[in-house]
Amino acid sequence: MQSLQEKASEWSGVSTVEAFGIDEGNINLCQKLGTEAFLNLSKNFYNRVYEDDEEWFRSIFANSEKQKAIENQYEFLVQRMGGPTLYSQRRGHPALIARHRPFPMTHQAAQRWLHHMEQALHTTPDFDHHSKTTLINFFRHTAYFLVAGVAHKDQNLHLLTCHNKDHPPINHHPCKNF
C-alpha cells in the first residue's frame, strides 16, 4: 500500500524531495521574503477564491470568514516557512488533514485551489522566481497529500462504522460516498 506521501507525489507530479525543498539548505523563506510577503499572498489568494466563477468551489468556503481564512493561511505559511510559530500559538498543531477533513478534498478541488494559488504567487510581487518554484512544489504536493489523507481517513471511518457489527453507524460519517 502506498503511503500518503507517495500518493501525493504520484498525483501531484512533485517528488517529496522537491516538495520539501522549503526545508533544504540555509534559506529560510520567511527570513528571505519577510512575513508581509505571506500576508500579501494570502490576501491575493483568498480574494481569488471568494471571487471564483465556479459556484461549487466558492461553496467550499461559504461557511468561512474571509479574514479568518487569510489569517489562518498567513500564520500557517509564516510558521511553515521558518518564521514564528504564530499558527500553533493561536490554534495548536496545524494537523492539516484533520482541519481539512470537513471539506470536499477532491482532485478537482485541489486543482482549482492550486490554480488560484499559482495565480496569486505569480501576481504577488514579493516572490522571486526560485521562491515561487519552491512554493509551487510545496503547494502541489501538499494539496494532493490532503486529498490522499482525507480519503484515507474517510475510508477508515467507513470501514469502522459501516462494517463493524459492534459499532453502531453514526449519522455524519462518509459511508454515503462509497
Image (cartoon, grey):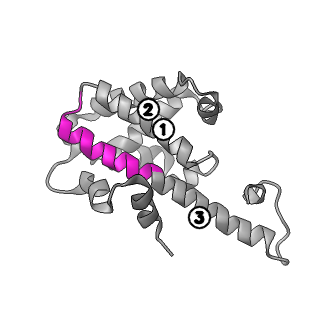
Helix, strand or loop at disc 3? helix
Instruction: Tell me where residue 176 sits by quadrant.
Output: bottom right
CA–CA distance in space, label 2 to label 3: 25 Å
Question: How far separated are the C-alphas under marks 1 and 3?
Answer: 20 Å
Q: Position of residue 122 (x, y in %)?
A: 30, 29
Residue 113, label in figure: 1
- Determine contact: label 2, label 3, CB under 8 Å: no
Q: Is residue 40 visible?
A: yes
Highlighted range, magenta: 126-143
The amino acid pointed to by label 3 is His
Characterize the local packing of mark 3: few (<14), some (14-19) or many (20 or more) Cα atoms within 10 angstroms: some
> Does dot 2 land on a helix, a strand or a loop?
helix
Look at the numbered discs 1 and 2 and tell me whether their residues touch, using CB distance below 8 Å.
Answer: yes
Element carrying mark 1? helix
Report whether 25 appears left or right of 40.
Answer: left
Badge 2 is on which residue?
A: 116
- Name the amino acid, label 1: Trp
Cα separation, mark 1 vs mark 2, equals: 5 Å
Q: Position of residue 97 (x, y in %)?
A: 53, 55
Horizontal side, residue 68 vs residue 122: left or right:
right
N-term-proximal mark, 1 vs 3: 1
- State the image coordinates of residue 12 (x, y, percent, origin top left): 41, 53
Of residues 172 and 52, the one nearer the viewer is 52
Q: Upstream in the sequence, badge 2 or badge 3?
A: 2
Write the residue at 54% across / 48% down.
107
Question: In the picture provided, is 145 more to the left or to the right than 158?
Answer: left
The answer to whether residue 94 shows anywhere in this view is no
- Which label number is shown at residue 152? 3
Q: Residue at x 40, y 35 (%)?
A: 117
Residue type at mark 2? Answer: His
Crowding around mark 2 (Cα neighbors within 10 Å: few <14, some 14 to 19, many 20+) is some
